Image: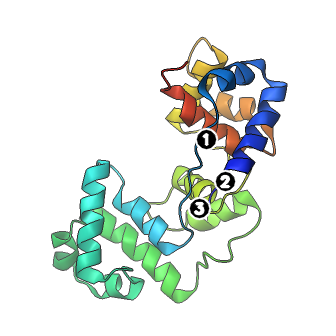
Amino acid sequence: MGLDAHQLRSGIDFAAATEPTIAAALAKAGYPEPRQRPTGYRTLLRTIVGQQVSVAAAASIWNRLEAGLGADIPPESLLAADFDTLRALGLSRQKQSYARSLCELIISGALDLSQLPQDDETAIAELTRIKGIGRWSAEIYLLFAEGRADIWPAGDLGVQAGLHKIMGLGARPDEKATRIIGEAWRPHRGAVAVFTWHCYDNPAL
């Protein structure tokens, strides 16, 4: 599971001690709630299902998949289903390709989600072997499901917008600038990322 409340508080307090603008934002917005997801295949499949559709549409597709393939949506069942069956359940051609890539890696043992490498960059490289799982999706999985403390999704627009707001920057920083800014908060960048999402549309700020 992702970072718990204690880990979030500790990480944000660490950053607030070194960056006055974070301390000021924390005083106004308070600590964020934990964002936690289960580890494993289902969370990654749900990520694929949710790409480029609304939350409501993703939930509807997920419910249809569970009804059609079984509550756990076993990878074997998904692979055994033909194109038209999966299309009727809501998966486009592209998402079928992504889902099949995930299922094939899981069934073959080429990807063991219970034994991802401890090094974050190596773990990201493992996850991005799945079609449709890019760096951002891999980072979100490692942060929210595995609770890795130093994940810093610098390409995320919410993180960038949060820093822009918190730090009073002249413009929203790009990915490169966001990565540089985050260096000061190692090894607690995951907690700071959650805090930026908490802040960027927070009416208290």
> At x 61% / y 44%, what residue is drawn?
153
Relative to 69, say whether 33 is above or below.
Answer: above
Q: Residues within 10 Å of mark 3 (few under 14, many from 20)?
A: many
Residue 202 located left or right of residue 146 = left
Q: What percent of the width, then of the height, locates residue 112?
A: 61, 79
Asked if one can make out residue 173 in the rendered structure from this viewpoint, the answer is no
Relative to 48, say whether 23 is above or below.
Answer: above
Q: Amino acid at mark 3?
A: Ala
Q: What percent of the width, then of the height, locates residue 195?
A: 62, 36
Q: Do labels 1 and 2 touch, CB within 8 Å?
A: yes
Q: Residues within 10 Å of mark 2 (few under 14, many from 20)?
A: many
Q: Which label belongs to residue 34?
A: none
> At x 29% / y 47%, what residue is drawn?
54
Mark 3: which secondary structure? Answer: loop
Q: CA distance from mark 3 to mark 1?
A: 13 Å
Please state, as top left, top right, bottom left or bottom right, where the N terminus lies in the image.
bottom right
Mark 1: which secondary structure? Answer: helix
N-term mark: 3 or 2 = 2
Determine which residue is flagged by label 3: 145
Determine which residue is flagged by label 2: 3
Q: What percent of the width, then of the height, locates residue 117?
A: 73, 69
Q: Amino acid at mark 2?
A: Leu
> At x 58% / y 44%, what residue is drawn?
33
Q: Amino acid at mark 1?
A: Val
Determine which residue is flagged by label 1: 194
